[in-house]
Image (cartoon, rainbow, N blue to C red):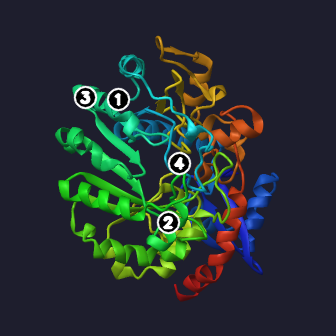
Amino acid sequence: MVVTRFVYIHPIQDAKYVLVNSLSGAVDLVEKDVVDAFHAIRSGEDPAMSLEMESDLRERGYLFDSRAAEDEVVERLVAHGQKERAATHPLAFMMIPTMSCNLRCPYCFEPHKLHETSQVMSVEQVELAFKAIDEIRDMRTDMPLASVHLFGGEPLLPITESVVELILQRTAERDLDMTITTNGTHTARFLDMMRPHRERLFFQITMDGIKEIHDTRRITAGGTGTFDQITKNIGLLVREGFTVEVRMNLNEDNVDAVPEFLEFVKSENWHNYDNFQMGLSPVTNYTGLGGDGLLAPYQVEERVRNVVPEPLFKEVRVALNGDFSRLNKPVADVLGESLIEGRFIPSLYYCEAAGALFYCFTPDGLVYPCNQILGDSKWAIGSYDPELKLDPEMVELWQGRNVTNMTGCMECSIAFLCSGGCPVRASITSGSPMDSYCGTSKKELTEYLDSVAPKLIQMEEMA
């Protein structure tokens, strides 16, 4: 008999402990005798526990007959996870018309030096990129779905109009959907070319709060605010029938202003359109440029839950970024506090870049594996101009990255919560995306469990 490798044990009160099973998603409040039994089993000693306790712990996924039996469960999870990913996640081909950007948002993960460039993808490069997309799709028989993303920099600028029009045409010829991540300042001038493609387009536009807050964060290169201009353009898109998600990036500076902004959304009547939704996301620090005022995702979720009245959440459709639930989903589900719908599923992949769902085509003629590291050639996995050439070893590092084949992860208690961490941060700290990046994951989980411990104890007492 063995104890699962994937149980996080945290003391919360005297002789009480909370168990979080990152493989099964089980969460249990137990006495010290259970933890003592685990220690005994791991030390090769008699655990001295009752048959009833053993049966309960087996049922919850804490005990297995052997390590091989646990490995079989992991293997089934991998097979199911890869099958599910292939059926639901498209390869994301990111077209980056330019790295130029007209905004200078203080928390941007891209260095603003990149945004000063005037280089634009040429017509020839667009054709070469789509030729490369066709070749990659033929190679990636494991992932039959595909989509195109417009990204930057800022993809919708006056200097990119002709290139964007061609990208729209080539995307339509392949009958692919397209996501456009834009700051929304120049969207109106692209409407005529986009109307014929309305049904396949999804816009993601950031607004960081009401005017007084937004205009201190989403600022132009000259330092002026953008709230009025973006509000006008979102209204145009929504009324024209385009699917739009307004994303609010949250840190200490604006997290408490979510209700006020949701009320603004209502005042604009956007929430009454089926083609509109809100999205909330914590400001992250994958590239080290996230700025000040960062909050752990669980802290953002807690603050949002505390400040937004439940009826307001029901009036305005709000989707939460997956970063919110990465570590706390099983416990939040037990407490009935999770703002993320659906049941807990053990996570194999930290992000879309892990497992190589991203192929990013930039004006420098290179192909990048992640949209957080564009413009720095050391991260490239190949080139597409003048022809597609991918580095097989680099591609394999990213494509093969899931938590079950990463150094150290299969002995980690929170492996299927953390999923090995960010591959970019792993590369920065240790030199390879295949290495794990633990960062502050266990610290954040510990802090979260300490914060909810009284609720867990109260639930047990009431049971």
Q: Residue 281 carries which label?
A: none
Name the residue beneath numbered marker 2.
Answer: 215
Secondary element at tag 1: helix
Q: Is 428 situated left or right of 53 in this image?
A: right
Of residues 232 and 458, which is closer to you in this image? 232
The mark that comes first in sequence, 3 or 4, is 3
Secondary element at tag 2: helix
Does residue 416 lie above or below 47 as drawn? Answer: above
- Distance, label 4 to label 2, CA atoms, is 37 Å
Q: Which of marks 4 and 2 is in front?
A: 2
Name the residue beneath numbered marker 1.
Answer: 163
- Distance, label 1 to label 4, CA atoms, is 37 Å
Pick out the residue farthest to the top. Answer: 386
Amino acid under disc 3: Gln
- Distance, label 2 to label 1, CA atoms, is 30 Å
Name the residue beneath numbered marker 4.
Answer: 347
Do the numbered discs 4 and 2 sit on residues whose CB atoms are within 8 Å?
no
Does residue 172 lie above or below 306 as drawn? Answer: above
The mark that comes first in sequence, 1 or 4, is 1
Name the residue beneath numbered marker 3.
Answer: 169
- Label 2 crowd bin: few (<14), some (14–19), many (20+), radius 10 Å: many
The picture places residue 443, in percent across and down from the top left corner, at 73, 62
The mark that comes first in sequence, 4 or 2, is 2
Amino acid under disc 4: Ser
> Residue drawn at (44%, 40%), measured in percent from left and top?
151
Q: In which quarter of the image is residue 62?
A: bottom right
The mark that comes first in sequence, 1 or 3, is 1
